[in-house]
Image (spheres, rainbow, N blue to C red):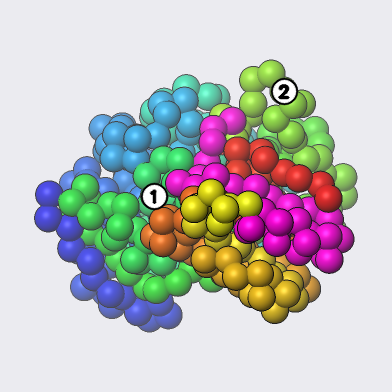
Amino acid sequence: MLTKRSYIDRIHPEVELLREGSEWLRSGELVAFPTETVYGLGASALDALACEKIFWVKGRPQDNPLIVHVSNRAMANKLVERWTPEAELCVQHFWPGPLTLVLPKTALVPDVVTAGLANVAVRMPSHPVALGLIEETGLPIAAPSANLSGKPSPTSGSHVWRDMKGKIPLILDAGACQVGVESTVLDVTGGVPTILRPGGISKEMLEEILGEVRMNTLTDNRVPKAPGMKYRHYAPQGDMIVMVGLQERVIQRMGQEIQKGHARLKKVGVLCTLESAPFLHSRLPDLLFVLGSKHRSEEVASNLFEGLRLCDERGVDIILAEGIEEGGLGAAIMNRLQKASGHRIEYI
Ligand code: AMP
Ligand code: MG
């Protein structure tokens, strides 16, 4: 299939391009588009066949449900059977934005979208291109991240191009995504709201509005509530280790691993904070990628997937990543680092 990559204005998207995207979506095809979190691979959420294509193109496991994106509340109402007071509060405070709400679904939502679950995950994105495309289509759009399953999520049009070229008819490219990690997935079906996946809206931000909020970890449930969380995700090709601890000790350990890697003729890449970079630079890794300042987790979040993808592009064999503190966006960042490394975390 011939893939067209159209550059679209991120603030004032060109109407002709939105229309072209909406025509593909209404005819049952897939379109990749930017959101404020990462790029999405969209299909009409009411078209079961189109949604099946998403799984096929990504190589996504069938039991991993899709998030449905809406551009207004009336559209969300058609998908959700019952809103809880907590869900209403979330809509008021965090929509449009990087928060996905899990709520009981209506019969309108095809089973393939929810992977047979009784709940649907709904989000209203804030990116003007995403909102414009959904509005122009007039339909809710199911969209997971526009990467091949298991690979780091795409945070730029170039990332999508590399993964989706030849597989879908259209990529709307608006440059880099702002947030850079996926949305927070929050179960608000009743009882204490529970974070099923940490993301762009932190636990602390939710607690300010909702009071008590729980973090669901995989070990809490034999059957994970957000099925996607059980898979190895975001994984670069190289072997990855995340190192957490006092800065000097992390730097020292990384220095040793760089030497060990080089002795085995391996290419060693380092993903680290701005604060550690000068010290690691002198240890001569083959690639040094600065994620951002440890005091600005938004910066680290927005660069994370770019760093992981760069390691692949440069053929890095061993990736050493510096962990960061878990507060705020730090929880989402550490969650992605854990998954990317296949849970290889060294506490030093
Ligand atoms: P992705 O679209 O790849 O960013 O992943 C979406 C995440 O939301 C995965 O972790 C899914 O398991 C989770 N999710 C989507 N739909 C539901 C649902 N109906 N109930 C619970 N979790 C969901
Ligand atoms: Mg994904």
Q: Position of residue 17 (x, y in %)?
A: 24, 70
Residue under circle 2? 221
Question: Residue farthest to the left?
Answer: 2
Check disc 2 and report its element: helix, strand or loop: loop
Residue 258 position by quadrant: bottom right
Instruction: State the residue at coordinates (75%, 56%).
Output: 253
The residue carrying pointer 2 sits among few (fewer than 14), some (14 to 19) or many (20 or more) residues within 10 Å by Cα, namely few
Looking at the image, which is closer to me, 258 or 230?
A: 258
Mark 1 residue CB less than 8 A from any atom of ligand 2: yes
304 up-or-down from 7: above or below: above
Which numbered dot is residue 290?
none
Residue 156 position by quadrant: bottom left
Instruction: State the residue at coordinates (45%, 41%).
Output: 150
The residue carrying pointer 1 sits among few (fewer than 14), some (14 to 19) or many (20 or more) residues within 10 Å by Cα, namely many
Looking at the image, which is closer to me, 266 or 144?
A: 266
Give left or right: position of 346 versus 230: right
Q: Is residue 300 visible?
A: no
Q: Amino acid at mark 1?
A: Asn
Q: Position of residue 81 (x, y in %)?
A: 56, 33
Give left or right: position of 272 versus 176: right
Query: Between marks 2 and 1, how big is the CA–CA gap?
Result: 27 Å
Q: Is residue 55 visible?
A: yes
User: Is residue 238 located in the magenta-colored stretch of the structure?
Assistant: yes
Q: Are marks 2 and 1 in contact (CB under 8 Å)?
A: no
Q: Position of residue 42 (x, y in %)?
A: 35, 50
Q: Amino acid at mark 2?
A: Asn
**Which range of residues does the magenta coloring cover?**
230-259
Q: How many marks?
A: 2
Question: Residue farthest to the front?
Answer: 263
Mark 2 residue CB less than 8 A from any atom of ligand 1: no
Which numbered dot is residue 147?
1
Closer to us: mark 2 or mark 1?
1
